[in-house]
Image: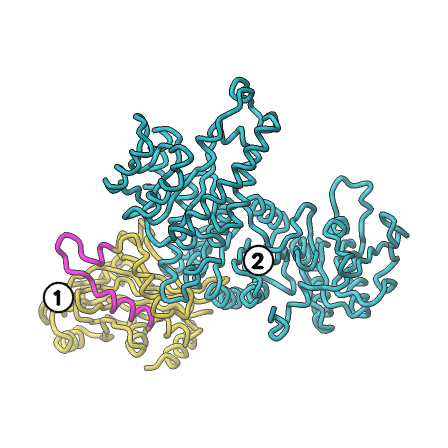
């Protein structure tokens, strides 16, 4: 790692060597996890000092609980504040005395309340911290998730590092994005929930993400932009060199009421936010689902798609094929007919009447011919990508599951689950090698068929395994098609900017 | 008249809306193709200026108190000779004073009448978050009803101006439908860039409309212009 030479001013914030949790809660009487619990779960103490602080407790889970920040051992780099708002000014003074590097205010009740007095308190405490060279995250937020530094703000976050950087104004949505994307296989380099953004805000984190070598894809949830010009400039710098995906919450009324011109009356804030994203070369997601799909696309070989021709592969029946072709067509993609030579070849593998070897390819060949057939499809003229739903068609159900179809994945017998998980890993591998061998991006599709349901757990296993191999898996043909269409549009309006999608991650 | 003296004069008079003539002069200086207009205060002056401009001409009322000029009978188009111009001058004054007796009338603007072309709008407004932004769209009913417009944050690069034109849904109209020749998209892009540079250099400008701008196969011209200054 060469980051030592070019350390960003915010690097220390993401890499504290000792953390104090001030106002730590006793977890015995809350059902919820706490920051302290999360740091125990990630085993932060293995790499640095972890100091719980609360004058009302002398110990917590058997560890010493300190009465004040000033009583903790030196040094403390990062403070997590869970104290009430009224106690914050005193804590700020202690942080200055203790010479900490950064503080994260989980504490709420400041400018976000709309109360002018509390907004003044917020400004005053930030001024004091800045004067002492201390950076602040929040108030009113969840703070940092940095697997490499063993920081996590919720229980159940993976300790494994990845290459996606997340910044979120909302703590709840930060959790949604992390948990939602983890089930898609994504892992994070860093995530930050920054709430009111009284000190560090969107443009600071975009600027950091732009230069962070561990972050390859950047995703943001933003409601309001506090400093539009600085945000736009930072977004331009970041989106120039990395895929940036933004979900904007809070659409406001279109057009300014006070406008005197046509232009003023037509300029709604969401239209202008959208324009700023396009201009910078970033992608705006309209919904949380879209955000998840676009991150998967930008981080897998979906990003390599350059044309619109889709081969849809994997049985499912005529109706499924028809609706799938419709969904693909609706997004401006095509389902080109297979060349006759390919059809003739495939007929040798699948002589069965009732199956279709044109496109959509509504047929599953015997396993010994599967690879040859996939290769034939992936390399056929006019095919730019293969949509593949591998968890259909096989394995054959065991007599038990066949005679006793159940409504719950959990009721599926253990044997079938184990076999299914093995098959999922194999399916992921198959998609990855097809992609590597033919150079044609493979897009995985999860089906809602009975077979797929029986293999409930394996769907997750396949999704994660495929992601690791650079294959994006999507919950439906419609979502996959929309995501591909958005990727193509994104590439189109990025013309004139560096081609950040041409190489695989 | 340069931008600064026009702005100062408007401020001295307590105006934030520049007159059409003022707006066009400063945009002309900024390299934006506009149908320049001359202010006249008598029918004889109107005749003389129309002769200079070349027939046919358009006459429009100039008053800080009248913003919808056609609504008060304050616009006459396609005037083909001096007698028509003189008659139109008298009629506009009569219409305007009849409709808005208290309006302060500065005179009448004489400008050459531009031939028919595809109407587009080029505009700028000040966004609360991002500051000055540019807008482009098809004019007339497309902007009124369809709101078929695109935006970019100032300052624009050349690719931004080009993309604005390509992003509107009705771009086929500019590319020539039913045997019509395509409009001069390069000239539109250049005008968007000139306006972007102009508003970047003049932070006093709060809103700006060039509406309509007429697009021809070879060149464009803005036939109306409005500039609103910040308070």
Residue, x 51% and y 20% (percent of image)? Answer: A402
- Return the residue found at the far top: A403
Name the residue carrying label 1: B79
Q: Is residue A88 left or right of residue B127?
A: right
Q: Quadrant of the N terminus of chain B?
A: bottom left
Q: Which residues are magenta?
A: B172-193
Q: Secondary structure at mark 1?
A: strand
Say whether residue A79 is magenta: no
Circles 1 and 2 in contact, beta carbons < 8 Å: no
- Chain in yellow, by letter, is B
Query: How many residues crowd mark 2 within 10 Å: few (<14), some (14–19), many (20+)?
Result: many
For image coordinates 88% across by 57% down, the residue present is: A67
**Residue A261 in the image, given as x and y percentages of width and height:** 37, 61
Residue designated by label 2: A165
Chain for colour cyan: A
Of residue B24 and residue A444, the one placed in the foreground of this image is A444
Q: In this view of the protein, which residue sits in the foreground, A346 or B196?
A: A346
């Amino acid at each position: 790692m060469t980051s030592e030479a070019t350390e960003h001013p915010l690097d220390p914030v993401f890499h504290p060597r000792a953390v104090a949790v001030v106002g730590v809660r006793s977890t015995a009487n809350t059902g919820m996890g706490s920051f302290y619990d999360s740091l125990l779960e990630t085993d932060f103490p293995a790499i640095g000092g972890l100091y719980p602080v609360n004058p009302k407790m002398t110990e917590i889970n058997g560890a010493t609980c300190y009465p004040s920040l000033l009583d903790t051992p030196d040094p403390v780099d990062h403070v997590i504040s869970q104290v009430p708002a009224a106690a914050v000014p005193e804590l700020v003074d202690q942080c200055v005395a203790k010479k900490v590097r950064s503080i994260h205010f989980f504490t709420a009740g400041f400018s976000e309340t709309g109360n002018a007095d509390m907004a003044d308190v917020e400004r005053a405490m930030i001024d004091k911290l800045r004067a002492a060279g201390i950076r602040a995250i929040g108030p009113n937020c969840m703070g940092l998730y940095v697997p490499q530094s063993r920081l996590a703000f919720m229980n159940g976050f993976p300790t494994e590092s990845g290459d996606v950087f997340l910044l979120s104004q909302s703590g709840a949505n930060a959790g949604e994005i992390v948990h939602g994307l983890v089930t898609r296989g994504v892992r994070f380099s860093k995530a930050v929930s920054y709430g009111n953004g009284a000190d560090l805000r969107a443009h600071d984190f975009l600027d950091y993400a732009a230069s962070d070598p561990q972050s390859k894809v950047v995703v943001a949830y933003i409601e309001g932009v506090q400093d539009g010009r600085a945000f736009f400039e930072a977004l331009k710098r970041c989106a120039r060199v990395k895929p940036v995906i933004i979900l904007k919450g809070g659409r406001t009324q279109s057009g300014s009421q006070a406008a005197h011109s046509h232009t003023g009356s037509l300029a709604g804030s969401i239209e202008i936010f959208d324009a700023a994203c396009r201009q910078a070369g970033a992608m705006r997601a309209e919904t949380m689902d879209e955000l998840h799909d676009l991150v998967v696309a930008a981080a897998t070989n979906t990003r390599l798609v350059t044309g619109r021709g889709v081969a849809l592969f994997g049985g499912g029946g005529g109706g499924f094929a028809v609706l799938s072709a419709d969904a693909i067509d609706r997004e401006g993609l095509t389902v080109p007919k297979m060349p006759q030579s390919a059809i003739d070849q495939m007929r040798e593998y699948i002589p069965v009447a009732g199956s279709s070897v044109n496109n959509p390819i509504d047929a599953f060949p015997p396993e010994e011919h599967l690879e040859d057939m996939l290769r034939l499809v992936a390399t056929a003229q006019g095919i730019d990508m293969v949509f593949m739903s591998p968890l259909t068609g096989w394995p054959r159900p065991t007599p038990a599951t066949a005679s006793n179809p159940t409504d719950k994945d959990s009721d599926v017998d253990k044997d079938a689950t184990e076999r299914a998980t093995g098959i999922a890993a194999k399916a992921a591998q198959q998609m990855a090698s097809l992609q590597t061998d033919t150079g044609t991006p493979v897009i995985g599709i999860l089906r809602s068929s009975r077979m797929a349901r029986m293999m409930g757990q394996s769907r997750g296993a396949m999704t994660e395994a495929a992601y690791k191999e650079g294959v994006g898996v999507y919950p439906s043909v419609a979502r996959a098609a929309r995501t591909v269409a958005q990727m193509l549009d994104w590439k189109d309006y990025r013309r004139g900017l560096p081609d950040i999608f041409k190489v695989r991650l | 008249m340069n931008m600064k003296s026009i702005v100062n004069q408007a401020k001295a008079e307590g105006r934030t809306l520049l007159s059409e003539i003022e707006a066009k002069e400063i945009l002309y200086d900024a390299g934006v193709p506009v149908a320049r207009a001359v202010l006249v205060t008598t029918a004889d002056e109107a005749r003389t200026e129309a002769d200079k401009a070349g027939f046919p001409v358009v006459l429009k009322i100039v008053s800080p108190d009248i913003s919808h000029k056609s609504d008060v009978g304050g616009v006459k188009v396609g005037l083909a000779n001096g007698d028509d111009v003189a008659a139109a001058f008298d009629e506009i004054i009569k219409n305007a004073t009849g409709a808005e007796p208290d309006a302060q009338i500065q005179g009448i603007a004489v400008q050459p009448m531009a031939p028919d072309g595809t109407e587009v709008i080029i505009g700028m407004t000040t966004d609360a978050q991002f500051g000055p932004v540019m807008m482009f769209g098809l004019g007339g009913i497309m902007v009124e009803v369809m709101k078929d417009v695109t935006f970019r944050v100032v300052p624009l690069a050349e690719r931004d101006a080009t993309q604005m034109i390509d992003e509107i849904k009705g771009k086929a109209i500019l590319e020539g439908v039913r045997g019509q020749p395509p409009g001069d998209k390069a000239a539109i892009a250049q005008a968007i860039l000139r306006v972007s540079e102009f508003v970047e250099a003049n932070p006093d400008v709060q809103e700006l409309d060039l509406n309509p701008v007429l697009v021809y196969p070879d060149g464009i011209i803005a036939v109306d212009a409005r500039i609103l200054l910040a308070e």
